[in-house]
Amino acid sequence: MLRRLAVLALPLLLAASFASVAGAAEEPAARQRATPQVDLTSWSSYADFKAGQRTGLKMGRGQVSLLKARPRTVAGKSYEAGTWTSPWATPGFGATAIIPSWEATTPGRTLVRVELRAQDATGRTGTWDTVADWARTNRPVPRTTYSGQADDLGRVSADTWFATSAVTAYQLRVTLMRPKGSSKAVSLERVGAVASVDASAPRATSQPGPAAGTVLPVPTYSQMVHSGHYPAWGGGGEAWCSPTSLAMVLAYHGIAPTPTGITAGHADAVVDHTAKMVYDNGYRGTGNWAFNTAYAATLAGGDSYVTRLRDLREAEDYIVAGVPLIVSIAFGRNQLTGAPISASNGHLLVVVGFEADGDVVVNDPAGATNADVRRVYDRAQFERIWIAASGGTAYVVRNS
């Protein structure tokens, strides 16, 4: 069966999360708050994959892989391919944005293609839109997204599918490919998506919860010390907030990769390496949400995925569980007191904990040096710019 996880994907913490939301609803200020709707659905178990449709694939324990693959041509190259199509996922509300993420094993020159289609309340079904071609090795087909596709129900914009008007259901389709004649074991271990509709009304700041006073020992890396590095992967500096944040989280979990192909003498070469491994040739950047979690999944033993949270109270449950979050924010001048940069139209950093009063402790990679990365931000300011900028988007990387 599919796993529908409302906002959180930490099953043991679901009860605490829903209790906090229900409790907040009793407060007068919160009753006026338009809580965004979020639904995270994931397929990863044998039963999950069996519930979908498969062509040219065989079932395994927690995965699907190629069997009796069929010919497929991509970018002029011949492949053997098999396809898994999910059941229809129904969030229970009219979704305006859907962000897929996945975990796959792509050895050698294998790759996976991820597609999405949606259905509206009238039953009208849109066309299949290709979200991404992805492989850990970035060859022979470069890792890429396909922005600009549009049908009568929605469009692709890098890592996100945006609905033209609200949709009530969606499907994901993943095609596993290997070069013709190859025996490489390409497989899919998990695929899912977070569907959401943003709030339109002002919202009260969440109250501090169980993570107050808890700070996780996440190492600090600065993106700025990499300024000018590797223009082919974005050029470092301000462009590398996402891979720098991911490198910090991987190091915290003890699964930092060994840098390869990086010029000797680069400080924190793992950041350069991570930028190489998450670069999206479609939109020409390293901030693709799903590409970051897909790469992390090749190193981590637990789940890695993109989700959206309603507020910092829900983020606290992850911190209590020992899971730092990489979150996506944007802000203008004077909107984030103490930030190392004055403004950003898109920035990622790591939430590592909370002060006793509920303010947010972060590793902000925009710090000029590693010593400048650890910051404390006002809870209300931070929550406001996080929700407004990305609807509460977060990368979750869990190592078993």
Image: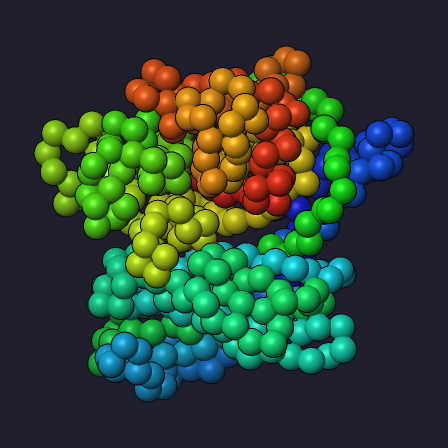
Image position of 326 (left or right of 260): right
Q: Position of residue 383 (x, y in %)?
A: 63, 31
| Residue at the outermost left position | 264
Residue 211 placement (x, y as % from top left)? 63, 23
Q: Nearer the viewer, residue 48 or 199?
A: 199
Q: Which of the 4 image quarters holds residue 3?
A: bottom right
- State how many labels appear: 0
In the rendered image, residue 176, in percent from the top left (x then y), is placed at 38, 72
How is the rendered protein coloured? rainbow
Residue at horizontal 19 percent and vertical 43 percent from the top: 230
Q: Is residue 102 above or below residue 353?
A: below
* Residue found farthest to the front: 333
| Name of the residue lying farthest toward the bottom | 71
Residue 59 appears in the picture as rendered: no
Occupied quadrant, residue 165:
bottom right
* Residue at position x 34%, y 74% in the image: 177
x 30%, y 78%: residue: 74
Q: Is residue 327 above or below residue 193?
A: above
Instruction: Say which quadrant the N terminus sits in.
Output: bottom right
Against 20, residue 361 (above or below) is above
The answer to whether any part of residue 312 appears in the image is yes
Q: Position of residue 8 (x, y in %)?
A: 64, 44
Position of 44 with respect to 186 (left or right) is right
Nearest the camera: 358 or 5? 358
- The answer to whether 266 appears left or right of 158 in the picture is left
